[in-house]
Image (cartoon, rainbow, N blue to C red):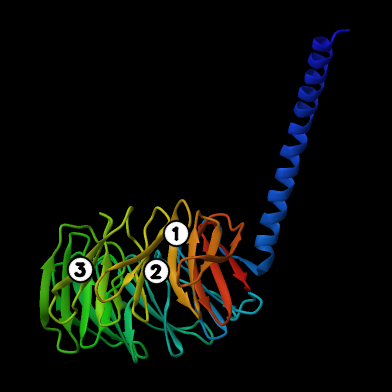
Amino acid sequence: MDYRTRLQQERRKRQALFLALIPAVIVGATLVGILLRALAASAVAWTYEGPKDNFAIPAVSGNVIVAVFSEGQVHCLRVLDGSQAWPTAFYCSQRLLNAAAIVGDTAVICSDYGKVYGLDISNGERRWSRELTGLLRGEPAVTGTLAYVATRAGKVYELDTQTGRHQLLADTQVPFCASPALCGDVLVAAGFDGAIVAIEIPAGNLRWRKRADATFVAPVAQVGQLVAIGSDQGRMYVFDPQTGSIIYTFEAAGLIRTAAVGLDDTMFFCDSDGWLYSCDAATGASRFRRRIGDSLQAGPIVYRDALYCLVDGDRVVELDHQGSVRRSWRGYHGACHLALGSGYIVVGTHTGRLYGIEP
């Protein structure tokens, strides 16, 4: 046997060994992935099975979670173990797509069809309900014992959260479809047609009205002394709430459908393509942008010393103020809503399940 034949045989042996190792490498990588996924999800403290095929929308207050389910139920859970805190759930024949606004001992729930409920947070009993004109697509803005609701019909109402007493504050003709924001003595709200208005509180007078070439479905957010509103065209508009002057705009890569947040002198916001942006809150000067996922469902939320986002429909990401990922938890199929409080992360899904995560 000459040396060429020996070399060919050795080459065949190496190739056969390589081919034999491929399945083992694939199996090993799969096992490592499963292990990492299990470890990432190991922080789950409890799960709660609500009504199936419902959007579960949590809000944390003190030691309880008020969980709104899209087909008309509201449950109250204990943060520590996910057990039910109310004797029975609250039921109504309305579609509920907004988180509860919790004011003292009252949970204010806005339905998709224009009805507002005030629930006693201690037992889930209905204190009051009011029928408003126009669909409600957003949580109310609250201050003290008052809540302000902007409807799809362009009407803005003031409600007393303890008694349900309400009055029409303004009729703007703007099709509001997200939560407004209180900024000092004005309430700022935006419509999907690009109109933005500021209404004086408590007089109800129109302070200013502007229009942008944009579609607004994101909540209005107060950032320092300014207000920020993201658009479906991938642009964040930042206004002076007193005059309506545009201070700056910031370009993003995708749709902006979640609220911006402010921390010290910095504004953070995300787009639907999973990018996190940071800029100087006063000038709009960019500080960084980071890709944290392929898609974004919720966030950013500032909690304690970190930012939290829900991405890719199954993963919660914790980031520092420079946008670096500290930790992440995954394995929450159908995740679409996020709330934080009392040392817990609460994930709501579109299957009716809630997860309580203890970081």
Which disc, if any, is residue 248? 3
Q: Which of marks 2 and 3 is nearer the N terminus?
A: 2
Q: Marks 2/3: CA distance?
A: 30 Å
Can you identify the residue that label 2 sits on?
98
User: Crowding at label 3, few (<14), some or many (≥20) Cα neighbours within 10 Å?
Assistant: some
Which disc, if any, is residue 297? 1
Question: Residue drawn at (23%, 80%), measured in percent from left and top?
Answer: 157
User: Tag 2's secondary structure?
Assistant: loop
Q: Marks 3/1: CA distance?
A: 26 Å
Across and down, in percent, residue 97 comes to: 40, 65
Total count of labels: 3
Q: Marks 2/1: CA distance?
A: 14 Å
Across and down, in percent, residue 54 comes to: 50, 59
Which disc, if any, is residue 347? none
Which amino acid does the dot numbered 3 rest on? Tyr
Question: Residue drawn at (74%, 32%), measured in percent from left and top?
Answer: 22
Locate the C terminus and report the quarter of the image it occupies: bottom right
Q: Which of marks 2 and 1 is nearer the N terminus?
A: 2
Across and down, in percent, residue 69 comes to: 48, 66
Which amino acid does the dot numbered 1 rest on? Gln
User: Tag 1's secondary structure?
Assistant: strand
Residue 42 located left or right of residue 127: right
In the rendered image, the vertical position of residue 244 relative to residue 331, given as above or below: below
